Amino acid sequence: MDKIIIEGGHPLSGSIKVNGAKNAALPIMAGVILSSDPVKLTNVPALDDVVTMANVLKAIGVESEFDGNHTYKFNPSGTITEEAPYELVKTMRASFFVMGPLLARLKKARVPLPGGCAIGVRPVNIHLKGFEALGAKVSIDGGCAVATADKLVGSSIILDFPSVGATENLMMAASLAEGKTVMENCAQEPEIVDLAKFLNRMGAKIEGAGSPTITINGVEKLGGGTYAIMPDRVEAGTFAILGAMTKGSISIENCEPNHIMALINKLREMGAEVSIFENSLTVKATKALKAIEAKTLPYPGFATDMQAQLMAALCLAEGSSTITETIFENRFMHVSELARMGANITIHDRSAVIHGVKSLKGAPVSATDLRAGAAMVLAGLVAQGTTEINQVFHIDRGYEDLVGRIRELGANIRREE
């Protein structure tokens, strides 16, 4: 199993390019099932999760071809089967996105209950209640969610919680339902807007994506076409925090700054200088960072996917900071790893109090989940001495060649088997 070795304390500067968004690519790839014509996706990140989703699609009958340059070509015109393979779905929660499209296209779907990062219970009952509202019969059988319908019919759906996954899955299912579906209390993340743009490009009729109310007028079928995946806002945010932590000047290219304004505001509150341009931003901090308070919230609030990385930065901030996690109940596993490097953090229920220290010291640590792994990399880059990060397969799920790209900024970082 690979590990990442970092010799910390080197000043970083330069520019780094943001890749396509994993959290947009995965549901859009699942949405290919809704089409019966070839679909070409560009700006697709070369990540393990993307490969897993391509393999899930292949297993149910969608042909795919990757050109090695962030482009996938899909052909969903063949025979599609209603059952996704357990061996693949268990490794990645986003595999569950295929259920809505399968149900819409075949009027039946059988998908194993999903796996993924161990950051808390993320039930799929909101998805299933939505499928029932569209006219499907839903059950759990042998560890699989099973849905069947003579036809899907547009309906009024009020989500119990603004779940990103449920919003996307139900939006895809309703795209081929008869009549109009009105979804209330929807998640508003940019990835949902990107999925709606993709589906509309293929012929869907979706309005209101990015707001709490989404209206879908069902159509008989979707066609093919070409679509470019949006930039990854979590990558952009991770690199922005890196710029604030390392006292250099880092330009983040090919990003949408308005997608991470909640983070930018926090960085400015900490004393970092953030310059915003149309498709890029530059972050630098010449003085010690200041303590702040932050709370994770659904978009446009501060993203839970940025919580671990922000905590790594606050370990060196002057004073005591507080981060409250409201989205996932088990997303403080990185605290014990940061403590191994000398961080002073105490947990009270769903809040972590970070008492700033003068320095972190390199140590053997583990990437307990995807974003925690990114936090370990950030901490290692500013720590004194050598940091060895294990379980880096988690990092590979969300960051393409993170080691190589950070090395170009001047970091002493390498990957070893």
Image (cartoon, helix red, strand yellow):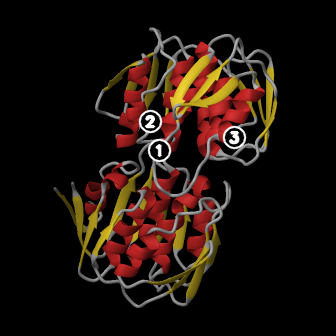
Under circle 3, the secondary element is: helix
**Quadrant position of residue 27:** top right
Above or below 384: residue 124? above
Nearer to us in this view, 274 or 260? 260
What separation in Å lies between label 2 and label 3 (alpha carbons)?
18 Å
Circle 2 — which element? Answer: helix
Residue corresponding to mark 3: 126
Cα distance between the residues tagged 2 and 1? 7 Å
Amino acid type at mark 2:
Val
- Is 381 situated above or below 32? below
Whether tag 2 and tag 1 are in contact, CB under 8 A, the answer is yes
In the rendered image, which residue does mark 2 sit on? 89
At a point 34% along the width and 66% down the height, the residue shown is 377
* Residue at numbered disc 1: 115
**Is 406 or 356 nearer to us in this picture?**
356
Q: Quadrant of residue 99?
A: top right
Q: Position of residue 71 (x, y in %)?
A: 37, 29
Three-letter amino acid code at disc 1? Gly
Look at label 3 and name its amino acid. Answer: Ile
Q: Earlier in the sequence, mark 3 or mark 1?
A: 1
Q: Tell me whether circle 3 and circle 1 mark residues in contact (CB < 8 Å).
A: no
User: Alpha-carbon neighbours of circle 3 within 10 Å: few (<14), some, or many (≥20)?
Assistant: some
Check disc 1 and report its element: helix, strand or loop: loop
